[in-house]
Image (cartoon, rainbow, N blue to C red):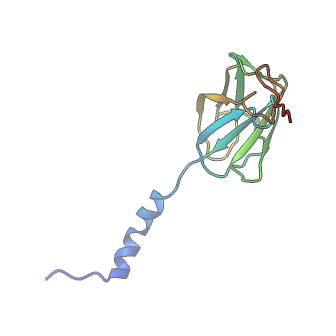
Amino acid sequence: MPQRIPITKRFVLWWPVLGAAVVSAVSYSGSEIGDTDTVTIEVLFSATVSASDFTAGVTIKKNTAAQTILSGTLQGDNRTVFYVVDTAADINDALTWEYDSGTGNIVGLGDVTPQDVTNYIGSHLYFDTADDSGHLVSVI
């Protein structure tokens, strides 16, 4: 007759397997420019991130030309990093963000191939520095 294994021991036997299944790595979620200003790229990650230098290993390109990154600042949600570049972008610019884990130190993030940065410059009424921005006038 087979021996019964108490339910508590069954869960103990499976605990390491279940524990390994819930471990997740950090990944790139998306990026945009234009909500803050024309020199700040906001990058969102899938989980909280940490690094001694968020600019290490990062390349930001505008129209295929690498930009000088002045700073990378982690925001209060610990998932968003604001990257400031030295030259302003406009509505017609195509930007990309990429990461090399060999030279960077964002904990848990692997290599990220060039990802398009969504360009919102000039698309908000409160942000009026782009060619296509407009003014609202009220006539009474």
Q: Quarter-wise, where is residue 40 in the image?
A: top right
**Residue 136 in the figure: left or right of residue 24:** right
The vertical placement of 69 against 7, above or below, is above
Q: Residue furthest left?
A: 1
Residue 103 is situated, as x and y percent measured from the top left of the image, at 69, 33
**Residue 34 in the figure: left or right of residue 11:** right
The number of numbered badges drawn on the structure is: 0
The vertical placement of 15 against 71, above or below, is below
Residue 105 is situated, as x and y percent measured from the top left of the image, at 70, 41
Q: Residue at point 80% right, 28% down?
A: 38
Question: On the rendered image, what quadrant is the N terminus found in?
Answer: bottom left
Q: Residue at point 72% right, 52% down?
A: 78
User: Camera-side residue: 56 or 113?
Assistant: 113
User: Camera-side residue: 35 or 81?
Assistant: 35
The vertical placement of 60 against 106, above or below, is above
Residue 102 is situated, as x and y percent measured from the top left of the image, at 65, 34
User: Camera-side residue: 15 or 36?
Assistant: 36
User: Camera-side residue: 126 or 109?
Assistant: 126
Q: Residue furthest front?
A: 140
